[in-house]
Image (cartoon, rainbow, N blue to C red):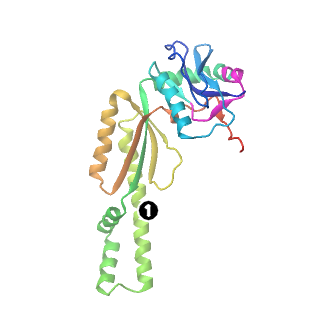
């Protein structure tokens, strides 16, 4: 049976709560596989595991319980290895890396930050900033709307201006976040955003980070900025000891 991997901890961390269970129906008991100074939190891997809400919450609960006793390197949902020995072998092989990550991520949390344009607000902004767009729009208004070609040209100018503004706003957002975060990585794959980043934040400085985000929102009302967190630092662990298990058929 495959071994499901929740995360990696220091072997010296406090014991897990008695009776802790994870994914599966019925839930599989969580075990600790020790190797050197490290340990992996695992259970038997269900054959029919699906990313359903109960299973996702079970995975998160194991990480939350482990995190209460010290730093944990979280594995993404669905991570599995062929057996226990395969997990301990990778712990041994990557011991220096995981020890360094445990030290680096101790006391830190991940936040995901996404930003998109508020359509009406950004259109007003680019028109106010771009004299060429403003003059052409006014000329078309005075001429009763202009020809089809003129309207098409104006639309292309506005689209180009919005695209340029996206690049500026994405760069400004990243620069602002760099001052209050320990690291920045690409966020989980998602479409429709001009910026999507995962950031590593000292838990003691989370208030400063959130204050910077609020300041960005106030200074740039044309931006819709969304924050999700605190989260386990998934984006700052790789490479992990296992790849996500391929879904079974059925």
Q: Which one is in front, 37 or 245?
A: 245
Image check: 161 left or right of 8? left
Where are the magenta residues, as a range? 75-88
Callout count: 1
Is any part of residue 38 visible from this angle?
yes
| Residue 188, above or below 78 | below
Expressed as whole percent of the image width and height from the top left, the position of residue 15 reads 51, 13
**Residue 133 within the magenta-colored segment of the rendering:** no
**Residue 77 within the magenta-colored segment of the rendering:** yes
SS state under label 1:
helix
Q: Which residue is at a point 39% across and 43% down the rendered structure image? A: 227
Expressed as whole percent of the image width and height from the top left, the position of residue 150 reads 41, 82
Q: Which residue is at a point 32% across and 69% down the rendered structure image? A: 127
Expressed as whole percent of the image width and height from the top left, the position of residue 122 reads 34, 62
Q: Which residue is at a point 52% across and 12% down the rendered structure image? A: 12
Expressed as whole percent of the image width and height from the top left, the position of residue 218 reads 27, 50
| Residue 148, above or below 83 | below
Circle 1 residues within 10 Å: few <14, some 14–19, many ≥20 = some
Is any part of residue 236 visible from this angle?
no
Q: Which residue is at a point 58% across and 13% down the rendered structure image? A: 37
| Residue 235, above or below 133 | above
Quadrant in which the N terminus is drawn: top right
Tell me the residue that label 1 is attached to. Answer: 163
Quadrant in which the C terminus is drawn: top right
């Amino acid at each position: 049976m495959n071994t499901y991997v929740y995360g990696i901890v220091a072997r010296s961390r406090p014991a897990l709560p008695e009776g802790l269970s994870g994914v599966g129906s019925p839930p599989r008991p969580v075990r600790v596989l020790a190797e050197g100074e490290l340990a992996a939190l695992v259970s038997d891997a269900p054959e029919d595991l699906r990313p359903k809400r109960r299973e996702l919450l079970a995975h998160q609960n194991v990480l939350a319980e482990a995190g209460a006793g010290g730093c944990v390197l979280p594995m993404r949902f669905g991570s599995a290895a062929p057996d226990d020995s395969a997990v301990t072998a990778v712990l041994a092989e990557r011991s220096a890396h995981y020890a360094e990550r445990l030290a680096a991520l101790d006391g830190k949390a991940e936040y995901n930050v996404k930003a998109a344009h508020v359509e009406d607000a950004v259109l007003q902004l680019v028109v106010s900033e771009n004299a060429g767009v403003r003059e052409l729009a006014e000329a078309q208004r005075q001429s009763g709307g202009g020809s089809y070609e003129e309207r098409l040209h104006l639309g292309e100018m506005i689209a180009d201006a919005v695209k340029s503004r996206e690049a500026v706003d994405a760069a400004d957002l990243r620069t602002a976040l760099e001052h209050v975060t320990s690291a920045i990585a690409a966020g989980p794959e998602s479409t429709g955003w001009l910026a999507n980043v995962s950031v590593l934040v000292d838990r003691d400085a989370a208030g400063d980070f959130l204050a910077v985000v609020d300041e960005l929102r106030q200074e740039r009302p044309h931006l819709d900025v969304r924050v999700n967190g605190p989260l386990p630092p998934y984006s700052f662990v790789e490479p992990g000891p296992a790849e996500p298990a391929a879904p079974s058929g059925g």
